[in-house]
Amino acid sequence: QVQLVESGGGLVQPGRSLRLSCAASGFAFSNYVMNWYRQAPGKERELVASITSGGTTNYADSMKGRFTISRDNAKNTVYLQMNSLKPEDTAVYYCNAARTLGRNEFRYWGQGTQVTVSS
């Protein structure tokens, strides 16, 4: 059974930091691109950051320099370190696993964790 379980969300003041974790099970984690998405109220879900199986990272422009994605393949876990948080970072953050194998695409989602940035 595939599971992606996010943790680490919460209420934080502007300028502070949070680290999100996503624990994966039930699939070959090290073979998947791992992504963090977020969705704010009334907005579409957007890609925050990605990390390939080899560790190559990619970030949305508004997160560059503030957010860092990393993974630990031994622990089947992906992380999102978020620094200098802003109120506009308030959203539900989702972990996603993605892989294309031939004509087949595999995508798995976590249940999300709420991040609220407010004074």
Image (cartoon, helix red, strand yellow):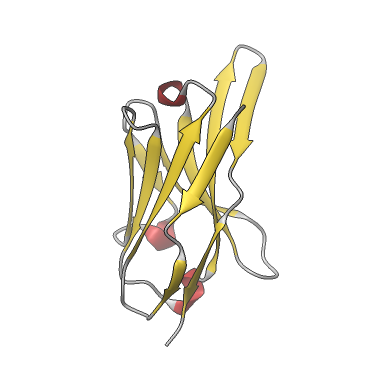
Residue 94, image x, y percentages:
55, 51
Label tally: 0
Residue 21, image x, y percentages:
40, 49
Q: Quadrant of the N terminus?
A: top right
Left-right relation of 54 to 32: left
Residue 7 higher or lower than 119, as above or below: above
Query: What residue is shown at x 42% (from left), y 57% (from top)?
Result: 61
Query: What residue is shown at x 38% (from left), y 26% (from top)?
Result: 53
Left-right relation of 103 to 113: right
Give the residue at the far bottom of this rendering. 119
Query: What residue is shown at x 57% (from left), y 21% (from top)?
Result: 100
Residue 93 higher or lower than 102, as above or below: below
Residue 102, image x, y percentages:
61, 11
Give the residue at the far right of this rendering. 42
Give the residue at the far top of this rendering. 102
Residue 64, image x, y percentages:
34, 57
Query: What residue is shown at x 32% (from left), y 26% (from top)?
Result: 54
Q: Quadrant of the C terminus?
A: bottom left
Residue 21 higher or lower than 89, as above or below: above
